[in-house]
Image (tube, rainbow, N blue to C red):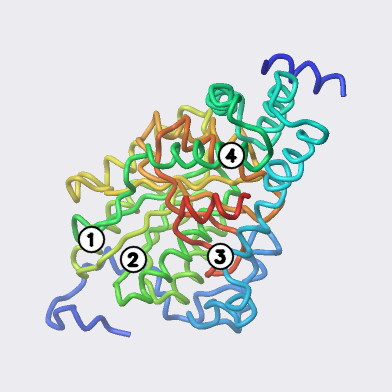
C-alpha cells in the first residue's frame, strides 16, 4: 500500500569546595576561558548563527532567561500543542473526514489512512505497523473516535517499549557528551541544560570541544556565564579530544557534578568526521572510566525523516543513549517522534518547542499524545 501512496503523491567567584591551598595547573589556566570576565565576551549579535538565537548582552544573569510571565501563563503544554499543529490536523480533522457518510472502516479508507500517517512524518515502516494493528480491529471501528483511540494506544506502546532513559547520576562528575549535525541547536541545548542543573544547586562545567566553528567558544562562554557554569576551551582548530580530556581532569579537580561536552557539528555521512567523535569518547574514558555516562544526540524536528537516518548513523558510530528533539515549533510534523522511538529504540529525553529556557522539557509520552489529539 505504501507504494500506492508514493504513486498517488507523484501524480498529485571562587569555588567554596576547592582547597584554597591547592595551586591550579598552569596548563589548565591557559586552557580555561574565564567566564567571569566581561572583556572575554563579544557582542551577542555577532556570535549567533540565526537571529532567533540572539541573546541581548544586557541579559547577563540566569534570571534573564528564566520563564517570562506570559510563557508561564500559557504553559509548556499549550506551546507543545501549537508545535504539533500540523500533525494534530492530520490525526484529527483529516481522520474525521474519512468517516463522512460512512459508518465503518473499509479497505479504501485504510489506504487513505495509511497515506495520512506517512504524510505526518511517521514514516513508512511505522505507518505500516499502525495500519496492521488497525486492520486487526477494523470490525470494531464504527467511527473516528474509536479509530483515534486505537492509534493513541498503539503510539503509546511504542514509547512504553523503549529502554528507560538514564536519570540517575552513577558517577561524579556525570559526563554528558552532546552530538549532532550543524544547525540543530546543540549549543543552545547545552546552555539550557546547564542552566537547569545550576538552578538545582549543581556545579556544572562545559567543555568547548567544538574547535572548528569560529563562534562556538564565544557562544558557550555566554551561556556558561549566564548559567553560572565553568568553561574549558583551547585555541581554535586545536584537538577536540584534548579539550575533552583536560575538561574531565579539571572537573575532577574542582569536584564538579555535571560536565557537558560540546562537539563540532558534522555530517553523519562523513566517516572521518564521525571517527573524530569516537576519538573524543575514548579520550574521556581514559581520564574517567565508564564516561561519558550519556551521549545525547540533538536532532532538528524540521528535517523530518532525515533526522531518523542521522540518528541511525550516530548510534552505529558511538552508541546514542538519548535524544533531544528541537525546533518542534509548528514548522515541523511531530510524527517524526513516533518514528524515531519505534525504529531506533533510543529514549527520547527532551523536546524543544521554542528558544526560551522553559521551552526545553523532559519528554512525557502521555503529554505528547494528549497534545497530538
Residue on which the image places disc 3: 359
At label 1, counting other C-alpha atoms closer than 10 Å, the crowd grade (few under 14, some 14-19, many 20 or more) is: many
**N-term mark: 3 or 4:** 4
Name the side, left or right, on which 154 lies relative to 372.
Answer: left
Residue 2 rendering spot, x and y as whole percentages = 67, 18
Judging depth in this view, the residue of 293 and 254 nearest the camera is: 293
Measured Cα–Cα span from mark 2 to mark 1: 9 Å
Q: Residue at x 28, y 48 (%)?
A: 292
Helix, strand or loop at mark 3: helix
Helix, strand or loop at mark 2: strand
Residue on which the image places disc 4: 336
Q: Residue at x 71, y 64 (%)?
A: 51
At label 4, counting other C-alpha atoms closer than 10 Å, the crowd grade (few under 14, some 14-19, many 20 or more) is: many
Measured Cα–Cα span from mark 4 to mark 2: 32 Å
Q: Which mark is residue 30?
A: none
Q: Are marks 4 and 2 in contact (CB under 8 Å)?
A: no
Measured Cα–Cα span from mark 1 to mark 4: 33 Å
Q: Dividing the picture into quarters, in which one does residue 309 lie?
A: top right
Q: Are marks 2 and 1 in contact (CB under 8 Å)?
A: yes
In the image, which is nearer the foreground, mark 3 or mark 1? 3
**N-term mark: 3 or 1:** 1
In the image, which is nearer the foreground, mark 2 or mark 3? 3
Helix, strand or loop at mark 1: loop
Q: Residue furthest right?
A: 12
Residue on which the image places disc 2: 205
Q: Are marks 3 and 1 in contact (CB under 8 Å)?
A: no
Residue on which the image places disc 1: 173
Amino acid at each position: 500500500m505504501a507504494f500506492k501512496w508514493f504513486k498517488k503523491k507523484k501524480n498529485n567567584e571562587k569555588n567554596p569546595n576547592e582547597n584554597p591551598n591547592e595551586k591550579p595547573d598552569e596548563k589548565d589556566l591557559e586552557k580555561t576561558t574565564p567566564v567571569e570576565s566581561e572583556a572575554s565576551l563579544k557582542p551577542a549579535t555577532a556570535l549567533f548563527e540565526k537571529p532567533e538565537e540572539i541573546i541581548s548582552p544586557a541579559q547577563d544573569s540566569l534570571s534573564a532567561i528564566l520563564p517570562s510571565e506570559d510563557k508561564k501563563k500559557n504553559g509548556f503544554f499549550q506551546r507543545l500543542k501549537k508545535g504539533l499543529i500540523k500533525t494534530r490536523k492530520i490525526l484529527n480533522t483529516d481522520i474525521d473526514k474519512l468517516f463522512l457518510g460512512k459508518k465503518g472502516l473499509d479497505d479504501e479508507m485504510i489506504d487513505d489512512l495509511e497515506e495520512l500517517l506517512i504524510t505526518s512524518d511517521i514514516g513508512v515502516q511505522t505507518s505500516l505497523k499502525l495500519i496492521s494493528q488497525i486492520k486487526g480491529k477494523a470490525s470494531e471501528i464504527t467511527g473516528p473516535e474509536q479509530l483515534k483511540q486505537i492509534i493513541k494506544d498503539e503510539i503509546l506502546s511504542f514509547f512504553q517499549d523503549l529502554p528507560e532513559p538514564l536519570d540517575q547520576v552513577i558517577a561524579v562528575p556525570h559526563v554528558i557528551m552532546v552530538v549532532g549535525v550543524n544547525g540543530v541547536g546543540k549549543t543552545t541545548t547545552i546552555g539550557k541544560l546547564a542552566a537547569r542543573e545550576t538552578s538545582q544547586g549543581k556545579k556544572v562545567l562545559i567543555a568547548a570541544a567544538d574547535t572548528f566553528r569560529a563562534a562556538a567558544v564565544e557562544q558557550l562562554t555566554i551561556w556558561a556565564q549566564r548559567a553560572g557554569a565553568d568553561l574549558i576551551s583551547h585555541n581554535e582548530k586545536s584537538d577536540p579530544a584534548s579539550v575533552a580530556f583536560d575538561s574531565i581532569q579539571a572537573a575532577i579537580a574542582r569536584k564538579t557534578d555535571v560536565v557537558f561536552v560540546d562537539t563540532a557539528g558534522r555530517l553523519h555521512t562523513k566517516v572521518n568526521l564521525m571517527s573524530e567523535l569516537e576519538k573524543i569518547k575514548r579520550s574521556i574514558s581514559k581520564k574517567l572510566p565508564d564516561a561519558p555516562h550519556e551521549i545525547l544526540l540533538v536532532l532538528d524536528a524540521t528535517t523530518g525523516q532525515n533526522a531518523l537516518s542521522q540518528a541511525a548513523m550516530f548510534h552505529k558510530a558511538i552508541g546514542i543513549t538519548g535524544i533531544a528533539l528541537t525546533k518542534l515549533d509548528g514548522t515541523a510534523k511531530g510524527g517524526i517522534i513516533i518514528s524515531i522511538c519505534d525504529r531506533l529504540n533510543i529514549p527520547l529525553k527532551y523536546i524543544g518547542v521554542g528558544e526560551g529556557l522553559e521551552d526545553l522539557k523532559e519528554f512525557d509520552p502521555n503529554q505528547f499524545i494528549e497534545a497530538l489529539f
